[in-house]
Image (cartoon, grey):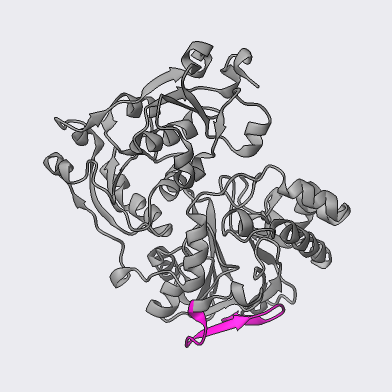
């Protein structure tokens, strides 16, 4: 048996390539849209990728399952659970696709993959028990948990409401998740837990940075999982719903597109943006439907000098996909400004994974900053230097999450999470300066650039929230 975890650090997402080395066949579970890397990995290990499966309809990236089924002839295995609204619409009636329910199994060579219904994160969610029949095993060795059980956390049950817009369902989803977790009590404790996400994902609130775990360990030390096994349902529901971060704006679009079927990549290939000369920047500056993404790491450097209207979407720390997904529309045409040309392919992959396909151009950011026109700055102050005088006539925009805000905030501040600004930008006043802060300065930097691109006078408040003078706090 062959098993490999393939991690996308930008989205903290894990896909799994599982193969039977005797027959040379393999399946990929929860693939992202740029499937060439899975095909390459399989081939380099003398395997043929013959099947693909998703644990559920994902909200944080576009699935590559359709690409594999329709373009590469893989068999597809997808949930038929969850009711009419939670079906893989694109896969219905498609040759090579099998819609599966709780307890159904399929084989890839001598590997058995059995579905286990685990709703709560979503109604149709399946986990997969993997048994190496070819190795003589009569019990599963792993549970691919998708967004059901993570290392140190469990899947959030609020996304149907907070991201997909189905009002009034988060509490019932939390109750369903409680029951799903309790039903795992009979599973063998030696099972490896292979989750679809790790630390940094917005699909939970306290995911561990360890890539895999063991079921018995999670039963003991995964606090929400242990609470479900040992505690009362009402206590679990209250705890799991408290403090969940606001999901990025693009999550609703991912749910829609993964249900309908992600658009196939033209020719099965990634977009190939062309190099842009600074003399062509006039075609991008201030042009509706065109966005410029500045991937510099140094937020102070961006504030000091950048192309007017460009967005600060740093390439490190898992910020890029969240910022781009929160501030860029699916039909926008994109120019990326890079510190290093070698980053271009990975940037294109990151954008395609969240359905931002119109990556038309790129240029070195240093070259862009040599332009004779179209440059701007954003005033920057340290959070420790805030005083009542600076707040007079200004709007304080706190772009932390609602839970952080409720724990303490600047008196009179407007709270809009940085991931939701695009849908609430009209709440940000146009008259007077807007002082944008967060807990450390990074989220505020991304938000400040976006708010400035929408015509507001902006001040970036950089530094720790704890450094803000206490007399300004409510």
Could you tell me if residue 392 is visible in this image?
yes
Give percent across and percent down for residue 345: 31, 53
Residue 227 left/right relative to 144: right
Q: Position of residue 292 (x, y in %)?
A: 29, 43
Identify the image quadrant of residue 296. Answer: top left
| 40, 74: nearer the viewer | 74
Query: Relative to 198, is 132 above or below?
Result: below
Instruction: Tally the numbered discs.
Output: 0
Q: Give the residue displayed 57% in from the left and 49% down from the top.
A: 202
Q: Is any part of residue 226 visible from this angle?
A: no
**The C terminus is located in which quarter?**
top right
- Residue most toward the left? 279
As drawn, 242 above or below 409: below
Q: Residue at x 42, y 81 (%)?
A: 73
Q: Is residue 438 left or right of residue 307?
A: right
Quadrant location of the N terminus in the rendered image: bottom right
Check residue 102 for magenta coloring. yes
| Residue 425 sits above or below residue 106 on the image | above
Tell me where residue 468 appears, x and y as whole percent.
57, 17
Q: Left of 113 or right of it: where is 295?
A: left
Out of 331 and 54, give the one closest to the viewer.
331
Q: Is residue 238 magenta?
A: no
x and y percentages locating residue 318 in the rendered image: 48, 43
Whether 94 is drawn above or below 190: the answer is: below
Q: Nearer the viewer, residue 191 or 447?
A: 447
Q: Which residues are magenta?
A: 90-108
């Amino acid at each position: 048996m062959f098993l490999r975890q393939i991690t996308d650090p930008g989205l903290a997402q894990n896909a799994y390539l599982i193969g039977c080395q005797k027959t040379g066949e393999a399946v990929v579970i929860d693939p992202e849209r740029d499937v060439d890397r899975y095909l390459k990995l399989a081939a380099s290990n003398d395997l043929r990728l013959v099947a693909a499966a998703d644990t559920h309809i994902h909200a944080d990236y576009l699935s590559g399952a359709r690409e594999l089924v329709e373009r590469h002839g893989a068999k597809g295995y997808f949930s038929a659970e969850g009711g009419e609204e939670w079906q893989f619409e694109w896969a219905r009636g498609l040759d090579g696709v099998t819609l599966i329910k709780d307890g159904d199994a399929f084989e890839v060579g001598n590997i058995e993959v059995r579905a286990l219904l685990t709703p709560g994160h979503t109604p149709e969610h399946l986990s997969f028990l993997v048994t190496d029949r070819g190795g003589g095993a009569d019990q599963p060795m792993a549970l691919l948990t998708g967004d059901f059980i993570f290392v140190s956390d469990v899947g959030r049950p609020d996304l149907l409401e907070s991201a997909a817009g189905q009002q009034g369902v988060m509490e019932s989803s939390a109750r369903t998740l409680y029951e799903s977790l309790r039903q795992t009590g009979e599973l063998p404790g030696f099972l490896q837990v292979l989750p679809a996400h790790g630390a940094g994902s917005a699909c939970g609130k306290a995911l561990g940075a360890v890539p895999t775990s063991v079921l018995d360990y999670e039963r003991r030390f995964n606090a929400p999982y242990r609470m479900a096994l040992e505690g009362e349902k009402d206590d679990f529901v209250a705890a799991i719903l408290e403090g969940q971060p606001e999901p990025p704006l693009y999550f609703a679009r991912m749910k829609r597109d993964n249900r309908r079927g992600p658009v196939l990549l033209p020719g099965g290939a990634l977009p190939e943006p062309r190099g842009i000369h600074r003399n062509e920047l006039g075609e991008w500056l201030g042009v509706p439907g065109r966005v410029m993404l500045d991937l510099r790491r140094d937020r102070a450097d961006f504030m000091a000098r950048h192309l007017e209207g460009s967005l600060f979407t740093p390439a490190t720390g898992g910020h890029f996909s969240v910022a781009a997904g929160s501030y860029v529309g699916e039909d926008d045409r994109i120019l990326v400004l890079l510190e290093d040309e070698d980053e271009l392919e990975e940037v294109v992959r990151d954008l395609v994974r969240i359905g931002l396909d119109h990556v038309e151009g790129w240029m070195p950011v240093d070259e862009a900053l040599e332009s004779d026109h179209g440059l701007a700055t954003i005033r920057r102050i340290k959070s420790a230097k805030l005083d009542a005088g600076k707040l007079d006539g200004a709007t304080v925009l706190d772009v932390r999450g609602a839970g952080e805000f409720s724990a303490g905030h600047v008196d009179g501040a407007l709270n809009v999470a940085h991931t939701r600004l695009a849908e609430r930008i009209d709440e940000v006043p146009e008259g007077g300066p807007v002082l944008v802060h967060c807990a450390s300065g990074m989220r505020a930097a991304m938000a400040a650039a976006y708010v400035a691109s929408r015509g507001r006078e902006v001040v970036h408040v950089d530094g720790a929230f704890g450094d803000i003078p206490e007399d300004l706090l409510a």
